[in-house]
Image (spheres, rainbow, N blue to C red):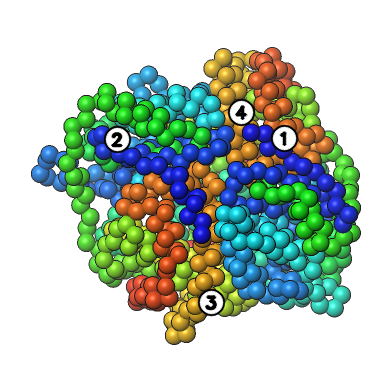
């Protein structure tokens, strides 16, 4: 079994708490990413050392990600570009990450990366200017039917959890962002104990660790207490079982979501839940399922039809989405098809075939340094690892899959339809 | 490490290109069938979707899907691509390396599956299976209707249509709805038989042996393929100064400005052309990003891209509809600045490093290796990575200005919201 591909992943924790991961490989490209366990859902928290919680405007983690590139001496994003490195950053529900790839002058860019994420520099002018740019980013998302369907479905599924809010916030929420608020968020979350760095490429792991250690030694961090994130209790019921909207699209789109109602999980248990749900979804509605063929042949779905389960410690959801001529009929056929599949159960042969597929896809993804580096980070922040994911895939049982039927309960479903403009 | 393709023309007529490397844990197979981009573009576009729908050995969608899952989740892709004025059917299959899994025969089985799909389609009477034909034709028509769903890409394709009304380059890779609506299961099968006698290139990247793969491909694929020559791209007339405005119900306006360069992939000035595009809008230090986004705060995205076979460039930005004139003037000023030689040392050197970085990373990605080699084949000019990197190291500001002076403005396209929304 292909565990050998994971054998070279190196991990060490550097004072005061930065986790360092390195996968040496003989590529020309060296890829580095610094992740912060801080995403769009972390809107309410207690700053270490204080008693009162604060609520910050939606979209601030993403706004901070944009503004971190500003330095007193200039712009770090342009600087990477001048060094010949290709830099980027992203904010998810739970993680903010800054990354670059380089084929020469790697260490200069690496030091720049470590430095700029720890050096906030915000002015009222630069914050005001960024609002114009982010407004255009939000407008772009407004015109993107895939993103729109996704965010609308989350709004339908969740009543209180901040995953229901667009990662970038809204034009109104970002208007409230100030340099002071950005400094507060940076101080709270951008502590090495809440961060990790990962490098994939032709480098010596000891050198990576040494550079990280030297960088951190010069910065006088106090040990940080626990960051207390305040998450609302999410009721089991969905917010709105059905939502409809119109936009410029060629055909209607249907999204069906199921909200995770199980208890919060971490580590390998969370991975098992994630893998089991994804395999169950594929068994009953994936390309090799009878239901998929029926829907495809009836002209109700096309090859862009998608299904996926998203897992995090404090929230989880399944998303089924596609373009269709008739969203109402498709909804009905999927719900009926799921009930029928549940009665029939999953065959062992199907599980074995899908297990093979998942292992093959993991090996395939492993060739991408970008995938490996970002997965190492996100699995680490959820208290687990890529290696655990392979273990879980290898010993999933039919009982694990059957247990997940509880999650695909039509009573806990929400749907969204986007229809073309008249 | 140098990654090179070993070439061979097999007895069945397939041009095999293998790149043997132990860098990856997967083996990528990509098959291309060449067609001129022209009035039969829709028929050609329908073929890959219809072929993967079912074949004699795996007659149903479900049979094909199960087969791929058995092959450790082989990633199977089917589409057409447009490179310059060439249209290519692209069928790809990627499987884990047998040695990583400790199994044998996986690559042979993958090639056999690919061959079944390409060479042994499901037939009915004198044509393709009618039901599959009907379903896949409908889905392709929907794909064409759906091009509006991705606004930035839609703006780009509309720009090329407006720039090239009388050149094949103006044709979309999926062809036109009118042509596709006129197809039948029989007429499409006739087209397939012609296509089956065309130029076929098969690329394989991974831990493989050329001779062994050649034997497997020769055994799996039927013969009848033959080498073909294609005309170079057509000459066009730039429509400088023409502005086309299209109103749709969008929140964000998308501006796409077309430019034509004299230099193409085939010319000595190609490295300088890469610099031109890089300095204009290829990077975060480029003129478009700095001036449209960072200085004027007008856009989230502002970039330029180059189609090197045709020598066409497009500068694009997503902006507030009210800001059209301002954004257009700023973009135009950047084009003018390049032609006037207003290029700083930082812009030259940052672009040089960025372009060399991109070239070096090509060999870290199996798909990138294939794309880069295919581009060379289509242009009848193979540019080995080391050679291009070397040339990028030597480009001077004068070279870039020479290319810039021959860049001609073409159509400016603007996708925008209804007029009544302006002025709010």
Are dots 2 and 1 on a single chain?
no
The chain ID associated with circle 3 is A
Q: Quadrant of residue A182?
A: top left
In contact (CB < 8 Å): disc 4 and disc 2 = no
Distance Cα–Cα, label 3 vs label 2: 46 Å
- Is residue A356 found left or right of B235 in the rendered image? left
Q: Chain ID for label 1?
A: B
Circle nearer the viewer, 3 or 4: 3
Residue A379: image x %, image y %?
Answer: 37, 51
Element at label 2 = strand
Other residues around mark 4 within 10 Å, as few (<14) / some (14–19) / many (≥20): many
Q: Is residue A107 above or below residue B214?
A: above
Q: Looking at this rendering, what residue extends furthest in the left direction?
A: A51
- Which label sits on residue A349? 3
Q: In which quadrant of the rendered view does residue B116 lie?
A: bottom right
Q: Secondary structure at mark 1?
A: loop
Question: Which residue, given by chain and number where applicable, does mark 1 sit on?
Answer: B308
**Residue B413 at what x, y percent from top left?**
64, 39
Q: Nearer the viewer, mark 2 or mark 1?
A: 2
Which residue corresponds to mark 2?
A14
The chain letter for the residue carrying disc 4 is B
């Amino acid at each position: 079994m292909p565990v050998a591909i994971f054998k070279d992943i190196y991990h060490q924790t550097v004072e005061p708490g930065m986790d360092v991961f390195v996968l040496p490989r003989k590529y020309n490209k060296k890829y580095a990413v610094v992740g912060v366990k801080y995403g769009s859902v972390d809107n309410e928290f207690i700053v270490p050392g204080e008693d009162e919680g604060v609520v910050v405007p939606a979209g601030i983690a993403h706004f901070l990600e944009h503004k971190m590139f500003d330095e007193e001496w200039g712009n770090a994003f342009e600087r990477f570009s001048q060094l010949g490195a290709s830099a980027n950053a992203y904010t998810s529900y739970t993680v903010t990450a800054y990354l670059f790839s380089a084929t020469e002058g790697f260490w200069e860019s690496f030091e720049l990366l470590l430095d700029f994420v720890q050096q906030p520099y915000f002015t009222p002018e630069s914050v005001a200017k960024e609002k114009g740019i982010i407004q255009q980013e939000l407008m772009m998302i407004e015109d993107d039917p895939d993103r729109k369907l996704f965010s609308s479905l989350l709004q339908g599924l969740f009543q209180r959890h901040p995953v229901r809010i667009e990662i970038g916030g809204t034009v109104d929420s970002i208007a409230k962002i100030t340099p002071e608020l950005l400094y507060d968020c940076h101080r709270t979350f951008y502590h090495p104990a809440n961060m990790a760095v990962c490098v994939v490429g032709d480098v010596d792991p000891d050198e990576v660790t040494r550079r990280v250690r030297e960088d951190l030694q010069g910065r006088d961090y106090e040990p940080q207490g626990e960051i207390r994130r305040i998450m609302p209790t999410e009721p089991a019921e969905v917010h709105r079982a059905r939502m409809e909207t119109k936009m410029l699209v060629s055909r209607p789109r249907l999204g069906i979501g199921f909200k995770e109602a199980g208890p919060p999980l971490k580590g390998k248990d969370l991975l098992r839940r994630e893998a089991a749900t994804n395999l169950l979804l594929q068994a009953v509605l994936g390309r090799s399922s009878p239901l998929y063929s029926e829907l495809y042949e009836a002209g109700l779905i096309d090859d862009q039809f998608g299904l996926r389960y998203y897992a995090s410690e404090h929230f989880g959801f399944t998303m089924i989405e596609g373009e269709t001529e008739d969203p109402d009929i498709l909804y009905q056929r999927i719900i009926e098809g799921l009930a029928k599949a549940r009665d029939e159960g999953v065959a062992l042969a199907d599980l074995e075939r899908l297990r093979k597929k998942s292992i093959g896809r993991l090996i395939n993804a492993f060739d991408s340094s970008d995938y490996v580096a970002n997965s190492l980070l996100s699995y680490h922040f959820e208290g687990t690892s890529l290696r655990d994911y392979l273990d879980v895939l290898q010993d999933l049982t039919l009982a694990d899959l059957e247990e997940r039927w509880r999650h695909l309960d039509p009573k806990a479903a929400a749907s969204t339809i986007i229809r073309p403009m008249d | 490490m140098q990654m090179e393709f070993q070439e061979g023309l097999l007895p069945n007529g397939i041009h095999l290109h293998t790149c043997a490397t132990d860098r990856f844990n997967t083996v990528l197979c990509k098959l291309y069938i060449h067609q001129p981009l022209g009035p039969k573009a829709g028929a050609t576009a329908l073929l890959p979707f219809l072929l993967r729908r079912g074949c004699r050995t795996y007659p149903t969608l479900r049979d094909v899907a199960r087969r791929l899952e058995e092959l450790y989740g082989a990633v199977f892709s089917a589409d057409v691509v447009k490179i310059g004025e060439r249209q290519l059917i692209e069928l790809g299959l990627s499987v884990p390396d047998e040695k990583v899994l400790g199994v044998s025969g996986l690559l042979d089985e993958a090639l056999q599956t690919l061959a079944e799909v390409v060479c042994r389609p499901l037939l009915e009477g004198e044509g393709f299976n009618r039901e599959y034909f009907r379903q896949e034709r409908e889905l392709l028509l929907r794909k064409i209707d759906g091009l509006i769903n991705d606004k930035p890409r839609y703006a780009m394709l509309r720009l090329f249509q407006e720039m090239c009304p009388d050149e094949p380059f103006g044709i979309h890779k999926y062809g036109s709805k009118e042509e596709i609506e006129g197809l039948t299961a029989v007429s499409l099968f006739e087209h397939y038989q012609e296509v089956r006698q065309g130029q076929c290139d098969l690329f394989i990247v991974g831990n493989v042996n050329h001779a062994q793969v050649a034997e497997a491909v020769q055994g799996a694929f039927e013969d009848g393929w033959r080498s073909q020559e294609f005309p170079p791209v057509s000459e066009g007339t730039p429509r400088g100064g023409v502005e086309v405005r299209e109103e749709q119900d969008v929140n964000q306006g998308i501006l796409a400005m077309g430019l034509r360069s004299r230099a193409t992939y085939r010319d000595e000035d190609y490295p300088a052309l890469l610099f031109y595009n890089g300095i204009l809008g290829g990077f975060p230090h480029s003129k478009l990003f700095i001036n449209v986004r960072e200085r004027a705060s007008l856009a989230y995205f502002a970039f330029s891209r180059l189609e090197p076979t045709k020598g066409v460039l497009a500068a694009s930005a997503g902006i507030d509809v009210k800001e059209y004139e301002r954004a257009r003037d700023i973009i135009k000023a950047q084009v003018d600045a390049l032609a006037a030689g207003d290029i700083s040392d930082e812009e030259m050197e940052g672009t040089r490093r960025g372009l060399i970085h991109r070239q070096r990373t090509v060999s870290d990605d199996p798909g990138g290796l294939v794309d880069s080699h295919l581009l060379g084949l289509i242009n009848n000019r193979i540019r080995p990575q080391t050679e291009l990197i070397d040339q990028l190291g030597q480009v001077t500001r004068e070279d870039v200005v020479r290319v810039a002076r021959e860049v001609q403005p073409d159509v400016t396209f603007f996708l925008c919201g209804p007029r009544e929304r302006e002025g709010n």
